[in-house]
Image (tube, helix red, strand yellow):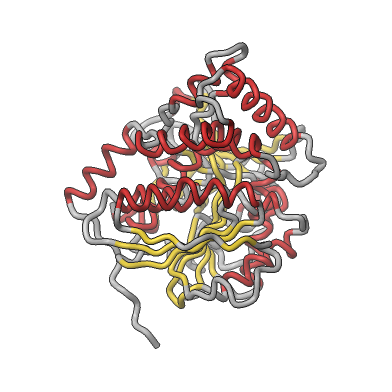
């Protein structure tokens, strides 16, 4: 067996470059110009021509309407303006979002310094461009990228953007994308093994809607991973796509694969994802010129997209997990699945933090999960009860493990959810990796 290759280790200078980028992230100027040049090439007019901008706006509105009403038809990218709308509205956020994920993988030492990457369902090249841009801020690393997409328009855009950007940066080689269907990729293509495979905002656009069928698609590509490789699945943060991702994740677990992050089976049991809606966030991006031009018209807010919110699952073949922490049999904590037996009582819990603060000016609210519950559970902290003893609820990272002691359970009949009320005398302590920081 080939031994694992050396992982990326960020030097102080590398880390500084990454921190500067994420402090105020944006589409790099060179890449911004490549997108503008592609718009001009496709339309035969300047990228900021009023007619071009109006048509892109119309395509953005149509895509958003189709997504939210898709009852749910598959979104397609068969026309040039479909791709231009994607590049103008979705691409900037997805680019930075992917770099956020890559940075976390690098910090966890999951990225080899010389790696093979597969961009599955590549679209116009968001993931590939993110890999190129992220690695450009690290010395002594390289990558080769292969990609596949069914849309001819997407492949055309990919070829206009990705090779040119890779050539400028010089650390990444890019193969011509395979034009094919992820559900039945061309025989002999994309053999791997790959160190990193990414499905970014792809699963919700597959023709198959059953989570088991989507998991089967992913599983076929898991076979193309190196033994210590990483599969990353990313989906939109809205409820339907986010929950569907967790269902796909559970089907992959049943096939013998391991969830590296963000979920941790604290009780060693399979989770019940039917009502699991959880997502991560990232820094707000600075809009590129094309987005600013779209937003300069009427109802400009409809064309400004700068918030990073996404659901993700990192899947491995080797059993490795970000959090190794498990609840010991002797630990005196309740399962979240048993909260109905503790309504009105004070209890102790061990749980993962599965959201940022989603509360308001009166209360902090964080979704929590231990892998056992079928009903959503939220830790609720009135702002006046926050203190140094319970602040770990808000300072902990997404997916981090905490032990909560002396909290009160409430049932919310209208929403069929539970609240764990954090009071002044409630203590919250990091566990697992968080306890070592």
State the residue at coordinates (21%, 43%): 16
State the residue at coordinates (61%, 11%): 298
In this rendering, does residue 417 appear at all? Answer: yes
Residue lying farthest to the left in this orientation: 12
State the residue at coordinates (68%, 62%): 181
Relative placement, left or right, of 86 versus 195 is: right
State the residue at coordinates (53%, 46%): 354
Q: Position of residue 256 (x, y in %)?
A: 60, 75
Relative placement, left or right, of 72 versus 192 is: right
The quadrant of the image that shows the N terminus is bottom left
Q: Where is residue 359 in the image (x, y as percent from the top left)?
A: 54, 28
Q: In this view, does 106 lie above or below 418?
A: below
Q: Where is residue 367 in the image (x, y as percent from the top left)?
A: 56, 41
Q: Position of residue 50 (x, y in %)?
A: 57, 17
169, 116: nearer the viewer: 169
Residue lying farthest to the right in this orientation: 71
In this rendering, does residue 402 appear at all? Answer: no
**Total marks placed:** 0
Q: Is residue 246 above or below residue 99?
A: below
Residue lying farthest to the top in this orientation: 298
78, 28: nearer the viewer: 78
Residue 253 is drawn in which quadrant? Answer: bottom right
Residue lying farthest to the bottom in this orientation: 1
Relative placement, left or right, of 29 versus 79 is: left
């Amino acid at each position: 067996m080939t031994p694992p290759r050396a992982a990326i280790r960020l030097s102080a200078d590398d880390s500084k470059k990454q921190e500067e980028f994420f402090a105020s992230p944006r589409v790099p100027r060179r890449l911004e110009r490549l997108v503008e040049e592609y718009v001009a090439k496709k339309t035969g007019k300047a990228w900021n021509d009023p007619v071009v901008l109006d048509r892109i706006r119309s395509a953005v509105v149509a895509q958003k309407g189709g997504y939210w009403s898709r009852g749910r038809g598959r979104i397609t990218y068969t026309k040039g303006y479909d791709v231009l709308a994607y590049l103008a509205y979705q691409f900037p956020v997805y680019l930075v979002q992917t770099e956020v994920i890559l940075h976390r993988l690098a910090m966890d030492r999951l990225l080899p310094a010389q790696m093979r990457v597969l961009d599955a369902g590549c679209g116009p090249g968001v993931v590939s461009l993110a890999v190129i841009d992220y690695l450009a801020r690290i010395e002594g690393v390289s990558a080769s990228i292969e990609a596949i997409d069914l849309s001819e328009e997407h492949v055309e855009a990919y070829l206009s953007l990705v090779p040119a950007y890779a050539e400028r940066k010089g650390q990444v080689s890019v193969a011509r994308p395979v034009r094919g269907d992820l559900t039945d990729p061309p025989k002999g293509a994309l053999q791997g093994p790959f160190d990193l495979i990414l499905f970014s905002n792809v699963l919700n656009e597959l023709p198959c809607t059953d989570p088991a069928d989507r998991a089967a698609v992913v599983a076929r590509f898991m076979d193309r991973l190196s033994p210590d490789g990483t599969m990353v699945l990313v989906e939109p943060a809205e409820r339907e796509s986010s929950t569907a991702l967790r269902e796909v994740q559970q089907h992959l677990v049943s096939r013998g694969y391991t969830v590296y992050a963000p979920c941790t089976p604290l009780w060693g049991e399979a989770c019940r994802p039917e009502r699991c809606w959880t997502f991560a966030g990232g820094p707000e991006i600075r809009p590129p010129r094309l987005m600013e031009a779209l937003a300069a018209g009427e109802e400009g807010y409809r064309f400004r997209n700068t918030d990073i919110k996404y659901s993700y699952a990192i899947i491995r073949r080797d059993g490795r997990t970000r959090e190794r922490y498990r609840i010991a049999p002797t630990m005196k904590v309740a399962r979240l699945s048993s909260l109905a037996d503790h309504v009105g009582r004070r209890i102790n819990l061990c749980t993962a933090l599965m959201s940022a603060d989603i509360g308001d000016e009166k209360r902090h609210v964080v979704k929590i999960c231990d892998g056992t519950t079928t009903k959503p559970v939220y830790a609720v902290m009135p702002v006046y009860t926050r203190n140094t003893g319970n602040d770990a609820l808000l300072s902990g990272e997404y997916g981090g493990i905490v032990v909560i002691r002396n909290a009160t359970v409430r049932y919310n009949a209208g929403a069929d959810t539970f609240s764990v009320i954090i009071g002044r005398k409630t203590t919250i302590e990091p566990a697992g990796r968080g306890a070592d920081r």
